[in-house]
Amino acid sequence: MGNNIVLTGMPASGKSTIGNLLAEALPDYTLIDTDSLIERTEGMKISEIFEKFSEDYFRQLEHDTIKMVCSGKNKIISIGGGAFENPDNRATLLKFGKVFYLKSDLDVLYYRISRDTTRPLLQRENPKKVLEELLEKREDNYKRAHYTVDTSLLSEDEIVRFILDETNSQSSDK
């Protein structure tokens, strides 16, 4: 297993926030947000990629990006909420890093996204129901991560400390 740290979870589970805090705590690590990388590479927002091309097109870009960023060491990789659904992505991420599922309950997630217009899967009628269905669909795969961290119960510092402790204890075990 590589020493990369992978953050997965639902939209608004805290992947970007925790990724940034980990990057501050681990200056020799590089933070990579696959969604941001795709947006920079394609020159458009993910919502535009969905609209102009398709979700399938985006998922292929996401797959290719994950393959590319998993090589090497000392990376904090924050992946999009749906990336862990793909069995090939999941296998790659589990092999090349320690995967942390940032879990939040539905009400916390909904509160966090309620005013965010940048999330294409939630730009629908009754976004809370869409979010609930997504969570139900994705939960089994998220639970395949090496670790589950409940972000609705812990402070940002506690989450970062847990991830650092698990990362350090694993690297000294192997």
Image (spheres, grey):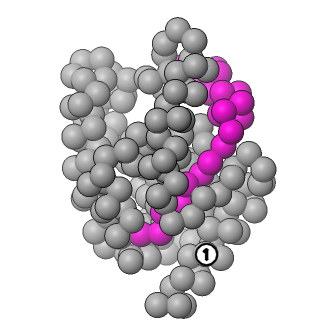
Question: Which residue is depicted at the point 57% across and 71% down?
Answer: 26
Percent across and percent down for residue 167 are 56, 76
Percent across and percent down for residue 44 are 31, 28
Q: Give the camera-side residue of 71 and 30.
A: 71
Q: Give the camera-side residue of 94 and 78.
A: 94
Question: Which residue is depicted at the point 53% across and 35% down?
Answer: 136
Q: Give the camera-side residue of 131 and 163.
A: 131
Q: What residue type is labelled 1?
A: Glu
Going by the image, does 82 lie left or right of 150? left
Q: Give the camera-side residue of 169 and 76.
A: 169
Going by the image, does 159 lie left or right of 97? right
Give the residue at mark 1: 166
| Magenta span | 97-118
- Around disc 1, counting alpha carbons within 10 Å, would you say few (fewer than 14), some (14 to 19), or many (20 or more)? some
Query: Does 112 appear in magenta?
Result: yes
Q: In this view, does 63 lie above or below 5?
A: above
Question: Which residue is depicted at the point 35% across and 56% down?
Answer: 90
Percent across and percent down for residue 131 are 55, 26
Query: Does 107 appear in magenta?
Result: yes
Secondary structure of residue under mark 1: helix
